[in-house]
């Protein structure tokens, strides 16, 4: 039993490290000035190809009756959050983006209350308050960010976690039509490709893949493939260890995201950012639901 838990914990750490790595890779991807919707298109296309291959190998197909559901997930869970994440990532440090993404469970809590998916809890309200305090520490002090103009992009960065929080609550309430996570992500990615391509062309943000590739293009490919693979492994972990155990990955994504930004991008942060990180991680610990019997 102890060895099984150790293996699952190592998988959890690996997932956190992999997911956290996508943040600095995203920062590199936007560094050359590529348009956000063009990046969204190629990210979704790469993910769709990989997941189609994986699901074919698993013998899983996408039912035609689920395409409306895929379209909803594509808009709320892929196109919108990815578009605004790329916009914000161009202006904000990668480590700050990793801290912001940890607000997902905190934003999800009041949405869950509104949908009748959860009960009020003082402990989780305290977690939400700590998370908001962390955002304020990033936004308001003069010395928190390298450039005060960056603070204007924090609300844009918060759009993505808000989308993910809404998506998670809706899926939690109405389910996934009996499909697993890899099938849902594949279907959403395919629909997302169809949505993002004409929008990217109309916005003049098409990215020509035939030009010479640099670090930003390779970073986009790496981030897209890594996200698809890590998400697939995350779905496996939910089945193997339970949803509450798997949900702990968000803490490691934030911590590793900040670490990778320091190592790969040479980012340095003020004391306010470190304090915000501490508040976010404490808030994340409080706001997550408690485990149930039988979960790892």
Image (cartoon, rainbow, N blue to C red):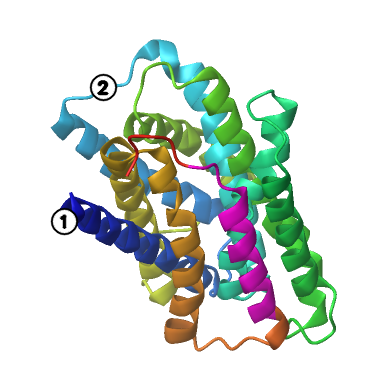
Magenta-drawn segment: 273-290
Disc 1 residue crowd, few under 14, some 14–19, many 20+, Cα 10 Å: few
Residue 287 lies in the magenta stretch: yes
- Which quadrant would residue 141 be assigned to in this image? bottom right
For the residue pair 28 and 76, the one nearer the viewer reads as 76
Mark 1 or mark 2: name the one nearer the start of the chain: 1
User: For the point 36% across and 71% down, which residue is it?
Assistant: 213
Residue 33 lies in the magenta stretch: no
Q: Secondary structure at mark 1?
A: helix
> Which of the numbered marks, if any, corresponds to residue 3?
1
Q: Where residue 181 appears, x then y in whole percent?
A: 37, 33
Disc 2 residue crowd, few under 14, some 14–19, many 20+, Cα 10 Å: few
What secondary structure is the magenta-colored segment mainly?
A: helix
For the residue pair 12 and 63, the one nearer the viewer reads as 12
Residue furthest to the top = 65
Do residues under tags 1 and 2 come within 8 Å of each other at their CB atoms?
Answer: no
Whether 238 is drawn above or below 142: the answer is: above
Judge left or right: residue 61 versus residue 77.
Answer: left
Judge left or right: residue 264 versus residue 76.
Answer: left
Judge left or right: residue 264 versus residue 233.
Answer: right
Q: Where residue 104 appears, x then y in whole percent?
A: 61, 49
Q: Secondary structure at mark 2?
A: loop
Residue on which the image places disc 2? 61
Find the distance from the CA under tag 1 to the CA under tag 2: 35 Å
> Which of the numbered marks, if any, corresponds to residue 108?
none
Q: Where residue 166 appears, x then y in whole percent?
A: 64, 35
User: For the point 43% across and 35% down, which residue is it?
Assistant: 292
Q: Quadrant of the C terminus?
A: top left
């Amino acid at each position: 039993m102890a060895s099984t838990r150790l293996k699952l914990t190592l998988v959890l750490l690996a997932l956190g490290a992999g997911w956290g790595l996508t943040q600095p890779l995203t920062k590199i991807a936007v560094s050359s000035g590529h348009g956000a919707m063009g990046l969204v298109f190629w990210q979704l296309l790469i993910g769709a190809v990989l997941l189609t291959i994986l699901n074919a190998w698993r013998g899983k197909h996408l039912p035609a009756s689920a395409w409306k559901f895929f379209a909803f997930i594509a808009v709320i869970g892929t196109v919108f959050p990815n578009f605004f994440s790329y916009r914000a990532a161009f202006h904000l440090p990668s480590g700050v983006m990793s801290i912001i993404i940890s607000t997902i469970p905190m934003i999800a809590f009041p949405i869950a209350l509104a949908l009748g998916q959860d009960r009020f809890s003082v402990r989780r309200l305290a977690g939400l308050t700590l998370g908001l305090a962390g955002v304020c520490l990033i936004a308001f002090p003069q010395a928190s960010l390298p450039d005060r103009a960056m603070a204007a992009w924090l609300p844009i960065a918060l759009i993505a976690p808000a989308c993910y929080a809404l998506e998670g609550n809706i899926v939690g309430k109405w389910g996934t039509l009996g499909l697993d996570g890899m099938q849902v992500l594949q279907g959403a990615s395919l629909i997302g490709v169809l949505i993002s391509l004409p929008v990217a062309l109309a916005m003049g943000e098409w990215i020509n893949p035939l030009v010479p590739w640099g670090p930003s293009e390779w970073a986009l490919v790496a981030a897209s493939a890594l996200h698809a693979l890590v998400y697939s492994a995350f779905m496996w972990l939910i089945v193997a260890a339970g949803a509450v155990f798997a949900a702990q990955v968000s803490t490691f994504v934030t911590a590793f995201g900040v670490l990778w930004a320091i190592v790969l991008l040479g980012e340095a942060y003020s004391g306010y950012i470190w304090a915000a990180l501490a508040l976010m991680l404490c808030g994340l610990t409080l706001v997550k639901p408690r485990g149930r019997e039988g979960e790892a």
